Image (cartoon, grey):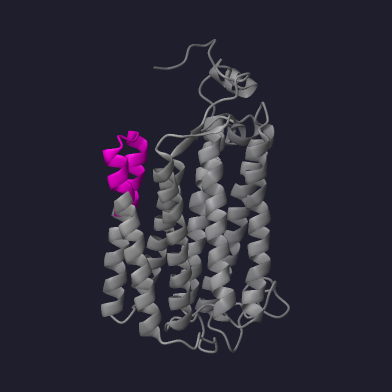
Amino acid sequence: MKPSAGQPGRPNLLVRGLRSFWAPTTRSLRGWALASVLANAGITVTGAGVRVTASGLGCPTWPRCTPGSFVPVAHPEVSMLNMLVEFGNRLLTFLVLAVGAACVLAAWRLAPRRPALMRLALLQPLGVLAQALWGGLVVRSALNPFTVGTHYLLSTGLIAACWLLYARAGEGDGALRAVVHRDVRRLGHVLVAAVLALLVAGVVVSGTGPHSGDEIASRFDLDIESVARLHADVAYLVVGLTFALLFALHVSGAPRAARRAALGLFAVELAQGVIGYTQWFLAVPAALVLLHVLGSTAVWIAALRAVTALRVRDPLPAAAGRPSPTEATAAV
């Protein structure tokens, strides 16, 4: 049905996009926060793609790609394909930064302004800039496995900050209130710590394994079979804790959202386990390494979702029931 002559049509996509952070609602701020989760997860996976394609030193200098040039130019010692892969990953940093900046603008323009959201939003551009500087150290250290692994773990921290912004934006600013028994919530915290330990163990395996990013890159002087077994043991612990959380949520009659979040985490862990064992028995092919990094990122996000589903924050008494001015305007 066409709008009448006196009724304006629906704003086009560009206008709606600008309004989403310049005249934000809680919903649009959460949308940007979720976009930031996905953007940071995406660049984590593409970073692994740089490593498994041996493109880690495709741009052998930093901040320039090659000596004297910020963009790829023919270099006698570097394949142009490797150079383009590494340079493309560097360009994605600007996309992640732009999404983070949109989160900051949306949190700043949201009325009434919520300081907790502002602090979480500011972590994003600051984190991306820190990541960019650390990326320079990765290149200058010739892909030392410690710097490469820390690069991944910094992305893990950024994803956590983005997810917390998404979760907090959907809550009020009142006191935190658990929706499950205190011991169940503690179990959730232990589970998240175990998942983080699993990611660290995975970094050690990656730093010991065959895909270094470049033939000149060093490796951890560890036995690959031993660290892989340690990684698997921590994975078993994580799966066991997840099953325990699922059982506790079921018998305690926890809210459906909490049970679904835990079940989603359990399903992602099982899929990740299948990928992990398959890549081990197939001698760690590059494609499955990339898929495994995607899976590890999904496990981390699912774990964050599961633990934030165990509590809520109610609106402050003075703000309860009253929409923000921008939300009221949007509703009109």
**What residue is shown at x 43% (from left), y 71% (from top)?**
202
- Where does the image place residue 152, in percent across and percent down from the top left? 53, 67
- Where does the image place residue 23, in percent across and percent down from the top left? 64, 29
Reply yes or no: does residue 264 show up in magenta.
Answer: yes
Magenta region: which residues?
A: 245-266
The answer to which quarter of the image holds residue 112 is: top right
| Count of marks overlaid on the render | 0
Q: Residue furthest right?
A: 68
User: Is residue 305 visible in the rendered structure shown here?
Assistant: no
**What residue is shown at x 68% (from left), y 59% (from top)?**
129
Residue 16 versus residue 308: which sits nearer the camera?
Answer: 308
Residue 307 versus residue 62: which sits nearer the camera?
Answer: 307
- Where does the image place residue 264, in percent across and percent down from the top left? 32, 48
Reply yes or no: does residue 46 show up in magenta.
Answer: no
**What residue is shown at x 57% (from left), y 70% (from top)?**
150
Relative to 70, residue 129 above or below = above
On the picture, is 235 further left or further right than 214?
A: left
Relative to 55, residue 187 above or below = above
